[in-house]
Structures are given as C-alpha cells and as structure tokens.
Amino acid sequence: MLSVGFWSESPARASRSPNQKLNLGIVGVANRGETNLIGVHHETISALCDVDEDYLEQRKARYPGAKRFRDFRELLDFPHLDGVMISSPDHTHAHAALMAIQRGLHVYCEKPLAHSISEVRRLARAAKKSPVITQTGVQHHTTPGYRRVAELIRSGVIGEVREVHSWTSRPYWPQAITQRPAAEAIPPQLDWDLWLGPAPARPYASGYHPTNWRGFWDFGTGALGDRGPHQLDPAFYALELTSPERIEAESSGVTEESPPEWSIVRFAFPARGNRPAVRVTWYDGGKQPSREITGVKQRLPDNGTLFIGSLARLFAPELGGNPIVIPNQSGAELPPATVQLPVSKGHYQEWLDACKGEGTVQCDFQYGALLTETCLLGNVALRAGKAIQWNGESGEIVGNPEARPYLTRPYRQGWEL
C-alpha cells in the first residue's frame, strides 16, 4: 500500500557545483540497470533498489556504502538524494519517475518512459512544470552516428524526405502468448508483490522475471516499445517530427496476454513548416522493407532505419552507427553538411552536468514522451485491430471508441496514479 502523501510535491534539490558529486539512487540494478549504473558510477551511489535480493548482493561489494532497498518508494523518500535513475520493467517507469519529480529529484528514466498513453501525458506535464532535470534513456541519441544522420538530412544532402522505414529482428523473448505460465513457487530472493507493483495481481511464474515480461501486455510494450524509441529516434531528431495523425497496423495477431510475433505499423506524420508530411513504417519480428524500397539486393542487417530522400537513400545502422548513403556505400562523395549540431559529452554526462547547473540535455521528458507516445500508439492500433486517427494536441483518438480503453490501463488498489 502506498504511503499517505505519495504524490506530495517538493521543491527541486539545489544545483551542485560541477566539481561536486551527486548523490544518486538507482532503481533496478541488473541488466539495463547495471549498464546505467556503470554510466554514472563516478558520482556518489547513495542508494540501490531492486526487488531481487540476489542482484542487490551482487552490487554490494562495489558500492558498500549504498543504502539498499527492495521498494523504490522507500528509496525515493531516502534523504539527501539529488537524483535517481530508473531501469525497472516498463510497467513501473511512470510511477517511479512521477514520484521522483514530485519529490524534487532529478530523473533519468529508461525508455519507454511509461506503459500507457495516459501515463506518458501525465509524466510530461509534471516534468514541464518542475525545475528538475529529466533525461530519457535513449542513450544512442548523443552518438556521432545519429548526430551525423540529422546533419545530413537537415542539410538537404539526400533531398526531401517523405518516407522512413525502420525494422528490428526483435522480439527475442516469447510473444503471441495465449495462456499465462503455470504458477510456481516464488523464489526466496524475489519480492513478487513489489515486482508486480501497479500491475494486476497474478501468480508468480519463471516466464516473467527477469526478461520475458516484455512479451506480456500487463508488464511490457513488445518489440515496438522496447526497440522503437531507439530506432525511431533518428527520424524524430533529423526530421523534427511531431505527433502522428494516423496509425495503422498489421500483425501475426495479438492476444489478450501478449503482443504479436511480428508486426508492421505505419505512422502518418503531418507537414511541419516547410517540411513535407512523412510516412514512417515500422517492422519487427524479422519483417523488413522490400528490395524495391531499399534499392539493395542483399538482405538487410537485422536492425536499422532507412530514410528515402528525393536525391538518395540514407541508412542509419542500429544504435548510432555511422550512416551510409545508398547506393554510394562508402559515402566518400557526399557533399559537406551545412548544418552542424553540437557535439555531446555523452548521454549520461549531459544529465549529470545539467543536474549540477551546467549545460542542458537533449532528450528530456518532453522529447522522450513524444517518442514513447508514438510507439505506444502503434500498440494501441495493434490491439484495436484497425487504423486510428490521433489528435496530438488534445491527446485523444478521433472516432474508434473501441480503441480508447487502450490509452490507459488498470492499476492494483493502492497503486493508482
């Protein structure tokens, strides 16, 4: 049960000198959490939280002075923290991040920022009103490769872009699940009730923790929610996209429990100023754009994003690799980009420095909310089974009342937002 005053607001912590270390709390210390922890280890790690005691024990030797918690709500009430990093499963992101903002803590939260559209909107509003520094965990945004993509496209090197294709081989976890795994005894090191958090109660099974939760609607957001924020990021960055207006999807078939084995989702984005409308197509589960679209005969890499320009095509490899102009594979004859974007100190360091009052971040929760909302809208279209029209300004589906329930989700008693 949540404590009284769970959503009470506190002022942001005072900024520190760039030479001073931040006192950080870490929510989720394994898998992505371990990677994020390494990214900020040079600061003071004051508190660690994980529902799995084995993971906490593994971090004990390296951070012996850190206070350890099982419940992130208790960590966020721990005094003297300046900021928190959230790397728990998707279904707890919004709860932890919103509580941190309202405690006046700076927040770094893994993608996707939230589990539902309503959570994304609430989190973005709270961050906009707050003086705290937020950063979304799309860490490849600050790589030279993604910056180069944006510079080339904004400079007009490949001409006018009206079409983008992005694909992934994921999921590598089970999806299209029709029945829940059989109940098992809860491992002694795992607090299953805290792991469930706001999700509807269900018996423990080994098919959820620590990875396969991504394939269940109650906990994860499928391949699109997992990989989409990373791979659609260069399109949003380079083309300065806003909310999509129309989303349509096809798939192997969703179930009540689970996303599909594969999907193809088409997003229609409106014109922006002197930029034309853009159609972005997402593929997962091994689906890829055709050879007619790509202009190449060989099979594509498992993951990537392709921009179709009026003068050339531009391939952005996964996770910030150096882009390639097609058919000029070497890129040697490219004209110079006339747009030069700032070089980043790195995704983690940007956030740390901004928390100390030095510089800004590139992927605050306003940007992260746009990425997350777009991917979650794809899931809404998949679950609704038909195309949806979206009003980004009001945050409403136009028509299609059967799709509207998927904009939110039920919470266990005591975990309501």
Image (spheres, helix red, strand yellow):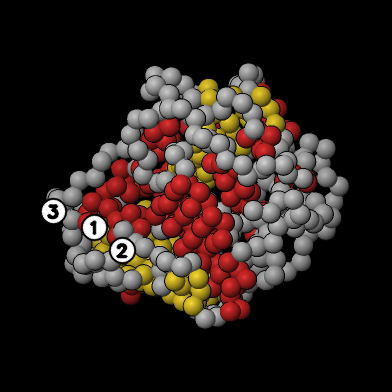
Is 251 on the left or on the right of 153, as rendered?
right
| Circle 2 residue | 307
The alpha-carbon separation of the residues under discs 3 and 1 comes to 12 Å
Instruction: State the residue in front, 100 or 222.
Output: 100
Q: Is residue 303 visible?
A: no
Amino acid identity at mark 2: Phe
Whichever of callouts 1 and 2 sits on the residue coming sooner in the sequence is 1
Asked if residue 57 is positioned above or below residue 95 in the image, the reply reads above
Residue 247 is situated, as x and y percent measured from the top left of the image, at 46, 73
| Circle 3 residue | 335
Classed neighbour count for the residue bearing mark 2: other residues with Cα under 10 Å, few (<14), some (14–19), many (≥20): many
Amino acid identity at mark 3: Pro
Tell me whether circle 3 and circle 1 mark residues in contact (CB < 8 Å): no
Which of label 3 and label 1 is nearer to you? 1
Answer with the quarter of the image where residue 64 lies: top right
Residue 128 is situated, as x and y percent measured from the top left of the image, at 44, 48
Q: Which mark is residue 153?
A: 1
- Image quadrant occupied by the N terminus: top right
Q: Is residue 133 visible?
A: yes
Amino acid identity at mark 1: Ile
Residue 409 is situated, as x and y percent measured from the top left of the image, at 65, 62
Q: Which mark is residue 133?
A: none
